Image (spheres, grey):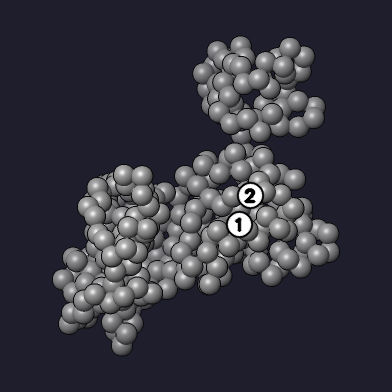
Amino acid sequence: MTGVINVYKEKGYTSHDVVAIMRRLAGTKKVGHTGTLDPDATGVLPVCIGRATKLADYLASADKTYIAEVILGVETNTGDISGEVIAKKPVSFDENSIAEAVNSFSFEFRGEYLQIPPMYSAIKIGGRKLYEIARKGETIERPPRPVIIHFIQVLDFAPEKNAFTIKVTCSKGTYIRSLATDIGKILGCGATMGELERTHSGIFAKADAHKLDKIKETTETGQFEKLLMPVEKLLPYPKIYISGHDLILAKNGNPLPHSASKGKYWLCSNDGIIGLFASDSKKLRAEVML
């Protein structure tokens, strides 16, 4: 059983909870997700099953799209509304100023955006996860990381709540909580993130995602595998079929002489996919063995 299921994570579940549930349903320990969502966040969480777990890094590196609520005048220790309030400031709600601040983060205006990750995150510094340090009441310096905001805009304003909603398409590693905090700094009143939903993760979309209850029901009727997307559809590279001595070499991860054009290829035998290989027009070299 190999493939990826597009899970719609609901509130209250951690990404690890989803993986644990999927392990039970799939009947295998080889399960992994492709990009953490906080417990209070919802949305698309692709989950790799079986040999597809070896492709998790490929899928996790895809751009992602979010719908996020930004609440002005409030700052928290986590960067979202679930955290402890550490500051409150008066707000002069100005829609034009808000839109200008939000738009200033797009790659068109800023290029790469140097973002400081939140203390409550799983990034490791000095071998320790930031959230473990934060839970002890400590704060340490975090080096900024370059990320890209491909698209960002205000979707609607809610002045009665001192809040607004944004849509963001961004590169891997972008923290929407930090983005909300930085928008608040530009506006001078501080901000924190409210609701957050991931609507896209690479080719995976909210419209095609399955909630856990639906996956459980499907599993009970013996149709779990129907929810799996094959790896060759997720990464639609051309296929090259091999046999004989070339097959033996490939299965051992050895490069193969081949004149295929530069690019990536699924290397296959009559029994199925061997792995993802890259060609330099002279040789095929293994990138991920399945």
Q: Residue 74: which numbered mark, if any?
A: none
**Image coords of residue 142 (percent x, y):** 25, 51
Q: What residue do we see at 60% from left, 61% from top? A: 18
Circle 2 residues within 10 Å: few <14, some 14–19, many ≥20: many
| Quarter of the image where the N terminus is located | top right
- Seen from the viewer's position, the closer of residues 185 and 23 is 23
Tags 1 and 2 touching, CB below 8 Å: yes
Q: Amino acid at mark 2?
A: Val
Label 2 SS: strand
Q: Residue furthest bottom?
A: 160
Q: Is residue 148 above or below residue 195?
A: above
Give residue 204's quadrant in the image: bottom right
Label 1 SS: helix
C-alpha gap between disc 1 and disc 2:
6 Å
Q: Is residue 61 visible?
A: yes
Q: Residue 19: which numbered mark, if any?
A: 1
Name the residue tied to disc 2: 31
**Image coords of residue 275 (percent x, y):** 64, 30
